[in-house]
């Protein structure tokens, strides 16, 4: 057998680890932009999936935002077909929605990937985020004052979404593509310093590496891993505590007051989500207002949540109310 280069082996090993537990005969889809990360991921999946008895398909999303985006998508799809992926799909999406164009493109992309997974009955959708993407995510989260959930970065698995390359340096995906003779697409957005992530990638992280040494990238990614484990443990405690505090009419104030503040804030966050508050809009300020109804009670009015729900304290319970009675 011909010897394979170390970066090709590293990417394949990461994909093996991610696909290892899936049932034989199941289908996975690779989300491939044609960039180095997802191209290396796709090449490794085409190699690993048949050896695990898995079907592998490929989806490339055309956001229609850049000149030549349809040609890029067609090139990726053509490569996917000759590489043996089946099905191969170009998902054309319309980017319009809340937030900036970056956020709107992301939600349109994830919706299209979810839709493809449902239609093709795929058990997993593979994304090409690398260790460097994770380090950037942690740095961005630190800069906006995020709590542990934000510092935990991107999860390796959430529902159907898998990120097999979170432990693989970005440099390795480029080297793997070069070793396999693949020419990745260069996303012009990555060089556009109008985007915060591009500035972190092009300026902030290189400055940190220059000041503190190259281990900083690995260390930031490791911080995410450690916090992900802690966050999962606290979330499990909070789920149990939420069930215990629940009554037919609302949440027991006495049960909430007895909780550790770190668990209580998670219980209140989870409950606010149940009441319809959208995750992106629900901030620490809203959770603190709910918390004040429990621990700083002075007869104050209802706490208002994004999404329209309001919560008041009545007869030892936190209850949903239609509007602030004050
Ligand atoms: N046009 C696309 N078609 C298919 N998959 C894509 C496309 N763009 C991105 N992806 C998938 O998403 C991964 C991350 O891409 P990128 O870093 O460009 O997105 P992002 O905006 O940072 O997304 P996220 O918010 O998830 O971090 C890619 O490795 C690839 O798997």
Image (cartoon, helix red, strand yellow):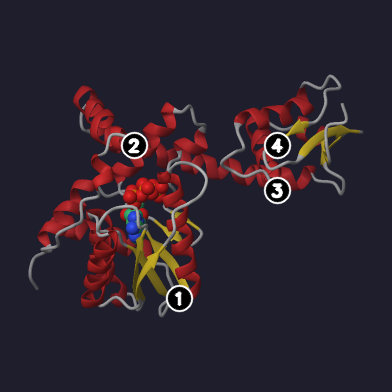
**Mark 2 vs mark 4, CA separation in Å:** 30 Å
Q: Which mark's residue is nearer the viewer, 2 or 4?
A: 2
Q: Earlier in the sequence, mark 1 or mark 4?
A: 1
Residue at 10%, 60% in the rendered image = 179
Quarter of the image for residue 234 reads: top right
**Mark 3 vs mark 1, CA separation in Å:** 30 Å
Q: Residue furthest toward the front?
A: 67
Q: Which residue is mark 4?
A: 305
**104 or 302, nearer to the observer:** 104
Say left or right for 320 vs 170.
Answer: right
Task: Evaluate whether residue 86 shows in this view.
Answer: yes
**154 or 90, nearer to the observer:** 90
Q: Which residue is mark 1?
A: 120
Quadrant for the C terminus, please: top right
Q: Position of residue 274 (x, y in %)?
A: 70, 48
Secondary structure under tag 3 reads helix
**Image height check: is 215 above or below 79?**
above
**224 or 27, nearer to the observer:** 27
Q: Earlier in the sequence, mark 4 or mark 3?
A: 3
**Mark 1 vs mark 4, CA separation in Å:** 37 Å
Secondary structure under tag 4 reads loop
**Mark 1 vs mark 2, CA separation in Å:** 34 Å
Q: Which residue is mark 3?
A: 274
Q: Residues within 10 Å of mark 1 (few under 14, many from 20)?
A: some
Quarter of the image for residue 255 reads: top right
Q: Earlier in the sequence, mark 3 or mark 1?
A: 1
Q: Which mark's residue is nearer the viewer, 4 or 3?
A: 4
Q: Is mark 4 within 8 Å of ligand 1?
A: no
**Mark 2 vs mark 3, CA separation in Å:** 33 Å
Quadrant for the N terminus, please: bottom left
């Amino acid at each position: 057998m011909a010897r394979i280069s170390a970066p090709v082996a590293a990417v394949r090993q990461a994909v093996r680890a991610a696909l290892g537990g899936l049932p034989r005969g199941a289908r996975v889809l690779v989300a491939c932009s044609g960039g180095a990360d997802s191209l290396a991921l796709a090449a490794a999946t085409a190699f690993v999936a048949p050896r695990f008895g898995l079907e592998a398909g490929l989806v490339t999303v055309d956001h229609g935002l850049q000149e030549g985006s349809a040609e890029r998508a067609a090139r990726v799809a053509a490569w996917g077909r000759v590489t043996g992926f089946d099905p191969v799909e170009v998902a054309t999406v319309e980017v319009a929605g809340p937030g900036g164009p970056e956020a709107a493109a992301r939600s349109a992309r994830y919706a299209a990937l979810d839709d493809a997974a449902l239609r093709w009955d795929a058990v997993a959708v593979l994304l090409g985020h690398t260790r460097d993407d994770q380090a950037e995510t942690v740095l961005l989260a630190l800069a906006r004052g995020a709590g542990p959930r934000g510092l935990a970065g991107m999860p390796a698995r959430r529902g159907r979404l898998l990120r097999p390359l979170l432990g693989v340096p970005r440099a390795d995906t480029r080297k793997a593509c070069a070793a396999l003779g693949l020419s990745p697409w260069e996303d012009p957005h990555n060089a556009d310093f109008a985007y915060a992530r591009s500035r972190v990638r092009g300026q902030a992280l290189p400055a940190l590496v220059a000041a503190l040494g190259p281990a900083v990238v690995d260390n930031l990614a490791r911080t995410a891993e450690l916090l992900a484990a802690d966050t999962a443990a606290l979330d499990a405690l909070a789920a149990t505590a939420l069930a215990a505090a629940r009554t037919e009419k609302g949440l027991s104030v006495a049960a909430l007051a007895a909780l550790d503040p770190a668990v209580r804030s998670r219980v209140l966050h989870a409950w606010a989500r149940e009441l319809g508050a959208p995750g992106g809009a629900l901030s620490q300020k809203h959770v603190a207002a709910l918390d004040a109804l429990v621990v700083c009670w002075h007869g104050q009015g209802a706490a208002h949540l994004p999404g329209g729900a309001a919560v008041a304290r009545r007869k030892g319970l936190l209850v949903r109310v239609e509007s602030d009675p004050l």
